[in-house]
Image (spheres, rainbow, N blue to C red):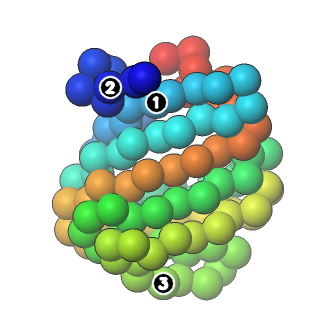
């Protein structure tokens, strides 16, 4: 069993702090995002599943922009450009596969 309260959060980019759980094949990320924080446009080898648990997050995936709210899920394929901005304070849950070695090293 893993208790999220026992995991130290790390600020990855301004306004985005996360707690990570890693398995051999995937990374789970629990994000606290400050209102107005910007996720720069980027892409990576990882397939990503993003669920908004609280707040409103404007996410652009492959040029299509949508506002995600509680319970909404975005599927981001490998190597697809994506970016976003927190319209309110947010809690976001991400799953990445394969494991995010860059986050694992934190």
The answer, for residue 9, to whether it is visible in the render is no
Label 3: few (<14), some (14–19) or many (≥20) C-alpha neighbours in 10 Å: few
Mark 2 lies on a secondary structure that is loop
Marks 1/3: CA–CA distance: 26 Å
Label 1: few (<14), some (14–19) or many (≥20) C-alpha neighbours in 10 Å: many
Q: Earlier in the sequence, mark 2 or mark 1?
A: 2
> Where residue 23 sits in the image (x, y, percent)?
64, 26
Residue bearing mark 2: 3
> Where residue 48 sits in the image (x, y, percent)?
65, 54
Side of 93 relative to 50 (left or right): left
Q: Residue at x 44, y 52 (%)?
A: 93
Tell me whether the residue at label 3 lies in contact with that at label 2, contact meaning CB atoms closer than 8 angstroms. Answer: no
Label ID, residue 1:
none
Q: Residue at x 75, y 37 (%)?
A: 98
Marks 2/1: CA–CA distance: 11 Å
Residue bearing mark 3: 66
> Where residue 42 sits in the image (x, y, percent)?
63, 54
Residue bearing mark 1: 20
Position of residue 50 relative to residue 96, above or below, is below
> Where residue 49 sits in the image (x, y, percent)?
60, 58
Marks 3/2: CA–CA distance: 32 Å
Name the quarter where the N terminus is drawn.
top left
Label 2: few (<14), some (14–19) or many (≥20) C-alpha neighbours in 10 Å: few
Mark 1 lies on a secondary structure that is strand
Q: Earlier in the sequence, mark 3 or mark 2?
A: 2
């Amino acid at each position: 069993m893993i208790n999220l309260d026992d995991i130290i959060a790390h600020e990855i980019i301004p306004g985005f702090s996360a707690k990570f759980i890693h398995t051999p094949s995937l990374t789970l990320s629990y994000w606290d995002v400050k209102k107005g924080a910007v996720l720069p446009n980027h892409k990576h080898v990882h397939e990503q599943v993003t669920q908004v648990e609280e707040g409103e997050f404007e996410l652009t995936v492959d040029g299509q922009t949508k506002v995600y709210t509680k319970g909404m899920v975005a599927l981001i394929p490998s190597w697809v450009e994506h970016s976003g901005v927190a319209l309110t304070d947010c809690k976001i849950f991400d799953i990445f596969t394969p494991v995010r070695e860059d986050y694992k090293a934190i």
